[in-house]
Amino acid sequence: MASLTLFDTMARHKRPFEPIDPDRVTMYVCGPTVYNYAHIGNARPVVVFDVLFRILRREFGAEHVTYARNITDVDDKIIAAAKELGEPISEITEKFAAIYSADMAQLGALTPTLQPKATEHIGPMIGMIQSLVYGGHAYESEGHVLFDVDSYDKYGKLSNRELEDMIAGARVEVASYKRNPADFVLWKPAADDEPGWDSQWGRGRPGWHLECSAMSAAHLGKTIDIHGGGIDLVFPHHENEIAQSVCAHDGQPMANHWIHNGFLTMGTDKMSKSLGNVQLVHDLVQHYTGEVLRYALLTAHYRAPLSWTSDLLSKSRRSLDRVYGVLRRLADVTPLETEAPEAFLEALYDDINTPKALAEIFQIAGEANKAATGEDKARAKGELLAAGALLGIGHGDPDEWFGLTALDASERDAIDALIVKRQVARETKDWAAADAVRAELTALNVQVDDGPEGSTWRKLEQG
C-alpha cells in the first residue's frame, strides 16, 4: 500500500509524512495579497497544494484535515493601489479576494477549510509581538517594533544560507531604526490616511511576516504538520516566520514539514511586469477551460520549474480530450465505486509526482477503452474517475467538454456514425474512403482528433 512521502525543504530530502495527530491534520499555505488579479504563477501553489489537500483527505478522512490559506488584506501594495485608484481599501480587498476565489475555483481548487484575513487577527498579532519583546527577541525603535535576528541562532536554517549571504542576496531595507540590517519589522507606524490599529507602540499595523505566524498559530496551533508556498517565499518570508514563531512559542517548531513549489517561467523568461509577459488567470480562463490550465500546471513535478507556453496548453487540452473521449464512449456505463489503481497512488504518494500520475491516468484510460465486458468497463471507469478525482480532472460532462450539448441527439448520432465509418476505413487501410469521410466532417464544421484511445470530435464555432 502506498505511503505518503514529501520533500521537506528544512531536511533537504524526502521523508514519510506522519501527522502530529491523525485526527487533526493541519496545513497552512500562504495566500494572496488582494490588490490585483492573480497571475498564472500565483495559481501554481494553489493547484499543487489542492492536490495535496485531496491526498490528505483521502488518507485521513475529509473531516480530519484542516487546510488554512490566508488572505493578506493590509499591506503597502494594497494601500498604494487604493491611493492610485481613489477607492477605499476595503472595496479593493473585497473585490480582489472575491475575484481570486472565483478564478481559483475555475481551476478546480477546493475551498480551503479556513481563509483567515489579516485584518481580523490584529489582537493575536499584537499578542505575539508582546511575547517577542518580553522574551528579548524584539525591540522598539522610532515607532517600529523589529525582530532581533541575532537573538535566534538558527536563523537561516531553512534557506541554508549564512546571514551575510542572505543580506547580500536580498533587498534588505537599511534603516536608521534597525540594529542589524537583517532585522525585520513586526509593527510599523501608520500615517493618518492609512489603516492602523492602536497598540502600546502607537497606532500602526503589523508586518507581513508576522501576519502568517499569528494566523497559523491562532487557527492550527503552535506547531503544524505542513507549511507550504512558492520557492520564492523560503527567504525572507518563511525564514522570518520560523524565527518569530519559534521564539514566541518557547522553542517549539512552527511546522514539521516545509514544502515549496518551483517557479513558473514564460518560455525561457521569468514572468515579470517589466518584461510585459504576465498572464492573468482571469484572462486565461476566457480562452481556455480552467481544467486545461490546471492540467498544464500538473505536467511538471511541483518542485521543478515549469515553462508556460501556448504549446503546453494545446497539449494539455489534447490530453484531456483523450480522457473525456474515453468517458464519452463509456457514458452509458455505471462506474463501480472503487479506488484508484495502486500504481497511480504510488506515483502520487511519492512526493506528489503528478507527471507520473498523469501517465498512469492514460494507462487506466487505455484499459477502460479496451475493456470488453460490462464489469470490466464499470471497474475501469470507476478507477479512471477515482484517479481523476485526486488530481482534480475528468469530472466534467464529456458532451459539454466537446461542445456537444448544443446539438440535438440526431445530429450527434449522425456525426458519431461518420466517425465510426472513418475509423473502419482507417482500420482497413481504405485511405481514400477515410479522407472522404473526413471531408464530410469538415464540411459539418467538426474537428476530429485521433489518439491512442480512438478518435474524438468537437463541433467548432462558426466564424
Image (spheres, grey):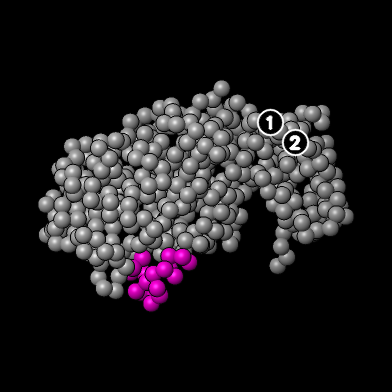
User: Which secondary structure lies at badge 1?
Assistant: loop
Residue 335 at x, y percent in the picture: 75, 36
Residue 104 at x, y percent in the picture: 53, 54
Magenta residues, dominant SS class: helix
The amino acid type found where label 2 is placed reads Pro
Q: Quadrant of residue 143?
A: bottom left
Q: Which mark is residue 389?
A: none
Q: Residues within 10 Å of mark 1 (few under 14, many from 20)?
A: some
339 sits to left or right of 179: right
- Label 1 with label 2: CB-CB less than 8 Å: yes
Closest to the observer: 372 or 44?
44
Instruction: Name the residue tied to disc 2.
Output: 335
Image: 55 above or below 138: above
355 sits to left or right of 122: right
Residue 392 at x, y percent in the picture: 59, 44
Residue located at (33% from left, 62% from top): 75
User: Which secondary structure lies at badge 2?
Assistant: loop
Assess whether residue 100 is covered by the magenta stretch: no
Assess whether residue 86 is covered by the magenta stretch: yes
The amino acid type found where label 1 is placed reads Thr
Closest to the observer: 169 or 462?
169
Image: 315 above or below 352: below
Q: Which mark is residue 338?
A: 1
Residue 170 at x, y percent in the picture: 23, 50
* Boundaries of the magenta span: 78-95
Residue located at (88% from left, 55% from top): 410
